[in-house]
Image: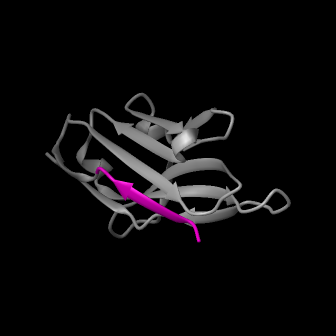
């Protein structure tokens, strides 16, 4: 059983910074892409940033230049450094990982439980 455990959310003033972490535990053969999504009240879940196994990254236009995604493959952990936060960044942030359970299996998506980020104006 694979679990993703997030940490680092909280309340911050506009212009401030937060760092989210997500650690994958359990029996895995490997992890392909890892990413962060967010869902604000009344809105659909949206992609924030993704980092592939080779290290390439992609970001939502709304966070480019402010957020940085990174990963530590040895720790099966992905990070999201968020700077210059805005009230519109307020949402529940979810970690996602595409996990391979064996050498011959396709990857399976796993999700964290979510962590609340609130940015006050």
Can you say which quadrant of the picture contains the C terminus?
Answer: top left
Quadrant where the N terminus sits is bottom right
Q: Residue at x 38, y 63 (%)?
A: 114
- The reply to whether residue 11 is visible in this rendering is yes
- Residue farthest to the top, as pictured: 65
Decide if residue 10 is on the left or right side of residue 95: left
User: Which of the pair 9/39 is nearer the observer?
Assistant: 9
Residue 2 sits inside the magenta stretch? yes
With respect to residue 35, does 28 lie above or below?
below
Residue 41 within the magenta-colored segment of the rendering? no
The residue at the point 66 percent across, 59 percent down is 28
Which residue is depicted at the point 33% across and 60% down?
Answer: 115
Q: Quadrant of residue 56?
A: top right
At 49% across and 44% down in the image, what residue appears? 78
Question: From this viewpoint, is residue 49 visible?
Answer: no
Q: Position of residue 12 (x, y in %)?
A: 17, 45
């Amino acid at each position: 059983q694979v679990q993703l455990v997030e940490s680092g959310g909280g309340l911050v003033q506009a212009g401030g910074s937060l760092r989210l972490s997500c650690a994958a535990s359990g029996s895995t053969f490997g992890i392909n892409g890892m990413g962060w999504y967010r869902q604000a009240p009344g809105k659909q879940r949206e992609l924030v940033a993704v980092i592939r196994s080779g290290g390439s990254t992609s970001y939502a236009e709304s966070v480019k230049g402010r957020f940085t995604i990174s990963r530590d493959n040895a720790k099966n952990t992905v990070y999201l450094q968020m700077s210059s936060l805005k009230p519109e960044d307020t949402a529940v942030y979810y970690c996602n990982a595409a996990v391979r359970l064996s050498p011959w299996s396709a990857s399976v998506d796993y999700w964290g439980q979510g962590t609340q980020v609130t940015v006050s104006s």
